[in-house]
Amino acid sequence: MPDARFEAFLLSLGTPAPPATSTTTTTMDNLDKLPLSYATVSIGYNDSHTLPEKLDAIAAAGFQAIELGFPDLLTFANQHLRPSKPQDGQDEITAYDYDNLCTAARHVKSMCEARSLKILMLQPFSNFEGWAAGSEERADAWKRAEGWMHIMEAAGTDMLQVGSSDSPAEKIGMDRGRFVKDLQELADMLAEKGMKVAYENWCWSTHAPTWEDVWDICQKVDRENFGLCLDTFQSAGYEWGDPTTDSGMVEDGRSKEQVERDWQASCSRLAKTVPKEKVYLLQISDAYRTKPGPLSKNDIDGLRSRGFWSHAYRPLPFEGYLPIVDFAKAVAETGFRGWWSYEIFDAGADGKGKEYDMGQFAKEAMDCQKKLVEACAKVDINATTGTAGVRAILFQHRLCIHTTVKRMYTMLQVRKLAVWRQYFCGWLLAAPTHSPLILDPLTPWTTQQFHEAGASVISVHLPINEPMMYPQGGDVVRIRCGNTELTGLVDRLASDSESYTSKTVLQRCGTLRHLFVMLSPMILSMARARLDQVRSTA
């Protein structure tokens, strides 16, 4: 008799969504054409690296835009407008000298145009929202907002990045309604100039350290010109990572596995919740696990621990340890195909500084973008297949050798895949909206149940001698993937010609993740080709 839990799972599937018609799926065809930007404040490591030199490096690497950092603009204004004056006292151009800063911004605009660079936005505008009415801090915040708006006009950019405030709670409170009102007024002021706000969660923020916090605020602000600046570091560095723990992960009473599951669930919610039109850009960086040990939980140089971490320990993707691919992939799954922007603050894992050639560093960032796009596509285990959507993964018993079963199921559960292991072993996990494939053998009963429940089935034969019976109709497709294909895949890892059974493939790959990363693109490609063939002859 069939396991009752499996029947309950089938009933829970409901009616699948209709075939997707959008072309904005997580594929290389879309992601390799993304417009790319680089934040000027995040390249160079000493004062001798001038803004013109930074622009040269960014443009030569192939980036199409910059985030203009206010500190760079201020330094350039002093170097360009008063190069022979002493840089002290009244002779120095200050952060409130907006006339001179606007003059400098016009020069920067000309320099960018000469290098075919767009000024994507002005950043970082901080500590704006929440100040008490009539306070000096509120007056200062609005003075800065108006001054920065004039700079934006001079620079020819229409976007202001605003970071969620890290001012102390005892000064700005925790009333989200007040934050929303301030941000509405800011958005309305900028709208008069055709400008917009890109609101970012800073992981050390007092009131909005997560993407869900800033998305909630964005919905409440409810202005057409108010959207999100999402960031791989800021989200992964708050929800998953923690620089003050030995593990480098959040340690708040949850197990590491639960932290991972919660992180994956958060990425999934982002992909399904945030409209692509409300994402204005994605900023990209990784983070080091700090050396020689964790950071202090107390403030460091006047910054909260995560703020200090952010300012010096953020290398290029894949040079740190955060799960940033998960977040980048989730943003891509919203359908967003706008600006991806690199914001790298790399002073080394010890935070003591790192010397590099700016031109080479910018090229490495561009090369890293290619790797990031490939990673987003390869780990897309939840990719759609062009069908109504497969809802579960079923492993043949002999593929699940005893020593790897628990690791396999943990990996799949993290990715929110429904798992059914044959011979009624139980391990039924929560079903997601989409899962990529089902591995043989499928009995006629289980296949029929999937079909009647409206679920599409991609069956990957790994291999079995007895042919399986499949119901007619629906998008039920059988694909043979025998030892020849598997051996070829493994050979690329092992660099030899040894033959492998499905059991030794798992052992030889070293990690199950490697096997699935390698198998997924081939299987999905075969599935799409077979579906096209079936439909063309129908």
Image (tube, rainbow, N blue to C red):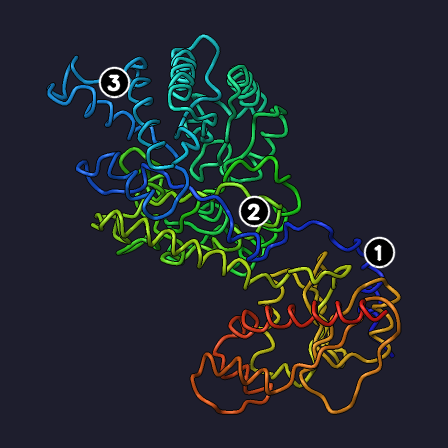
Secondary-structure class at tag 2: helix
Q: Which mark is residue 94?
A: 3
Q: Are marks 3 and 2 in contact (CB under 8 Å)?
A: no
Residue 15: image tag: 1
Q: Given the image, on which type of amino acid does mark 2 rest?
A: Val
The residue under label 2 is 331
- Check the picture and name the quadrant holding the N terminus: bottom right
Amino acid bearing label 1: Thr
Q: Residue at x 66, y 46 (%)?
A: 272
Question: Residue 361 versus residue 435: which sits nearer the camera?
Answer: 361
Q: Nearer the viewer, residue 446 or 19?
A: 19
Q: CA distance from mark 1 to mark 3?
A: 62 Å
Q: Earlier in the sequence, mark 1 or mark 2?
A: 1
Q: Position of residue 12 (x, y in %)?
A: 82, 59
Q: Is residue 455 above or below residue 131?
A: below
The reply to whether discs 1 and 3 touch (Cβ–Cβ < 8 Å) is no
Residue at 42%, 37% (x, y): give it.
204
